[in-house]
Image (cartoon, grey):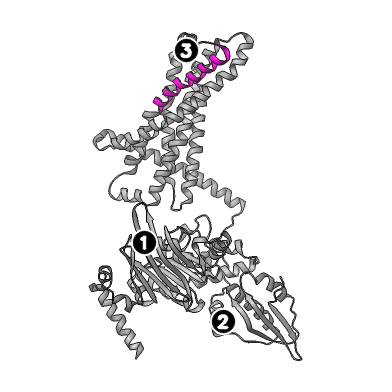
Amino acid sequence: MMKVIEVRDVITQFGSTVIHDKVSLDIKQGEIYGILGESGSGKSLLMKEMNMLLEPRSGEITVLGYKLSNITYREAQSLRQQWGILFQFGALFSSLTVAENIKLQLKEYANIGPEMCEQLVKTKISMVGLPAHTGALYPSELSGGMVKRAALARALAMDPKLLFLDEPTSGLDPIGARNFDKLIMELRDLLGITVVMITHDLSSIYSIVDRFCVLADKHVVAEGTLKNVLQSDHPFVERFFKNEYAQKHYNKIIKKKKIENV
Amino acid sequence: MNVTYLKIEQHQDFLKINSIGDWTLYTEPTIEKIIREIKPQTNIVWDFSKVTSFDSAGVLLFIKYLKKFQQNFEVKVTGYTEDQERFYKLIKAHITDEEIPSRDKNILHRIGEEVTVKYQEFTAYLNFSGHVTLSFLRYFINPRNFRYKEMMYHIHKSGLNALLIVALTSFLVGLVISYQSAVQLAKFGAEIFIVDMAGISITRELAPMITAIVVAGRSGSAFTAQIGAMKITEEISAMRTMGFDPYYFLVLPRVLALMIVLPLLIFFADIIGIMGSMFAAKMELNISYTQFVTRLHEVLNAKHFWIGIIKGPIFAMLIALIGCFRGLQVSDDTESIGAQTTASVVNSIFVVIAFDALFSVLLTQWGI
């Protein structure tokens, strides 16, 4: 399967603090890939480096075939139209309504008529499970869950091939979080989007993430499917997955999977 | 562009539409132009086997024209892949007729809104002044828990750190005033009167006003931004729940700090401003520094100096109150910090000038 993102030997360093020491990972097309790690392990920084918001000290990141270290302005602009990014707190532009937020890139980069634009916006709003009239609201008038959904609609505006999600379920209630997971899964299945997400949410990891990596001690200490990662005996993996709470959760999932397999 | 997105074949009893290539956001406008021209007379077979890429815009376009053609004829869609069908179904399921309501307001609405907002701001300001007064009175009941450290910090920030910019502006203003009037005075042979003019105008009017404007721009805006940021991050709410009154702990130290520091800054500006004017007098009219100072002693009545100094705490109170008030008015979104900071500076500069004019008129009326 084609690799959508390739991270090779990335070193991130601020002053004398080393955050990533030769981090490498591959993200394949069509998968939901999780990035997991302790707070301070540089998950968000790694994502920022993939998003061209930050340059690694050394190493190479390739996104959708573009090498980020020597990308030209034009290539960068075209790459930016092919991905969608959902920031942790939505980062909706507060001076624009939800519909205007979604419309922004469509208007800038595509030459479509106003009627088509309106229709597209409404479809995206509906796709993320919001009623059409929320399009007229300003971000400050939305609840936390609605902000996430609206921001997802904005990220989907250009029909991206690649979607970055920064803690998509944080700050949502458990039911809302599961619904959001379902939504992401549906979008992946239906639109064939590759999804890269930073998450701490055990349920998300169990239920929707195909493969993930664990960042700890400046390295990727485990990568692969849940089964693969669980074979690691790194202290963080032990702490995160082999505690009482996770164990209970994990058993349930395993049982379910067995039934499905039969 | 010579790319074809559509090929139309008229067969005996049906019209065959072949969709080709990319049906995406970027090609949609071109395709729509062509597809609009199709006026079918027979039933239609619409083939998608040559479509390479299909996104929401492409699907929406297809749905729109499928509906249109279906009104009069039968349309048979062929050649689509399973993925395309699923995608079509997804988009189809999310098409709504519900309109996004418009947020445009007519002029009457906007005027009405503006008036109510101004009125609410006014009452909010009264409420704010009441709170500040109360917390000021509370200070006398229990002066020990007052944040002296916080006040010292603001004295340092708004006073000491402002010395350089106050010096620079007042020196330049003193210099320019004398420089300009020197020419006029020389015509009458009244060169020495430059001392009277510069001495009185600088100490009584210019130094207080220039200093107040600099402080409004530096500290007033800083107060708004600091308190506004705390409001957004809910620090103010946190303070309230812990029983720390923000008026007492945030507003009062800032107001008092500025009231202490502004008269001192004005005194400083007096000195530097007069130095600027001495410099200009020496350059332009050849009046020596000793001459200037001796004359200044003779003509500059102390009352002018005191009037200038007394304006200090009053201006300071206005600036600090407006700065803090605007900070507390910041609402949940980031945009309002910018708006309130602008309003804070504009308001306080205006109020300073208005009060200065009022002083000027009143004092002249009273013959001081």
Residue B103, numbered label = none
- Residue A23 horizontal side relative to residue A244, left or right: right
- Is B263 magenta? The answer is yes
Q: What chain is tagged by disc 2?
A: B
Q: What chain is tagged by disc 1?
A: A
Q: Is residue A199 above or below residue B188?
A: below
Q: Is residue A6 above or below residue B272?
A: below
Q: CA distance from mark 1 to mark 3?
A: 70 Å
Q: Residue B152: percent from the left, percent from the top?
A: 32, 34
Residue A20, numbered label = 1
Q: Amino acid at mark 2?
A: Gln
Q: Earlier in the sequence, mark 2 or mark 3?
A: 2
Residue ID for mark 3:
B300
Q: Is residue B18 above or below residue B360?
A: below
Q: Tell me what residue is drawn at x 28 percent, y 73 percent.
A: A241
Q: Residue A28: percent from the left, percent from the top?
A: 45, 75
Are discs 1 and 3 located on one and the same chain? no
Q: Tell me what residue is drawn at x 75 percent, y 91 percent.
A: B13
Nearer the camera: disc 1 or disc 3? 1
Q: Is residue B28 above or below residue A16?
A: below
> In this view of the protein, can residue A143 be seen by the observer?
no
State the image quarter where residue B6 is shown: bottom right
Q: Amino acid at mark 1?
A: His
Chief SS of the magenta region: helix
Which residues lie in the magenta part? B262-286
Crowdedness near tag 3: few (<14), some (14–19) or many (≥20) residues, C-alpha within 10 Å? some
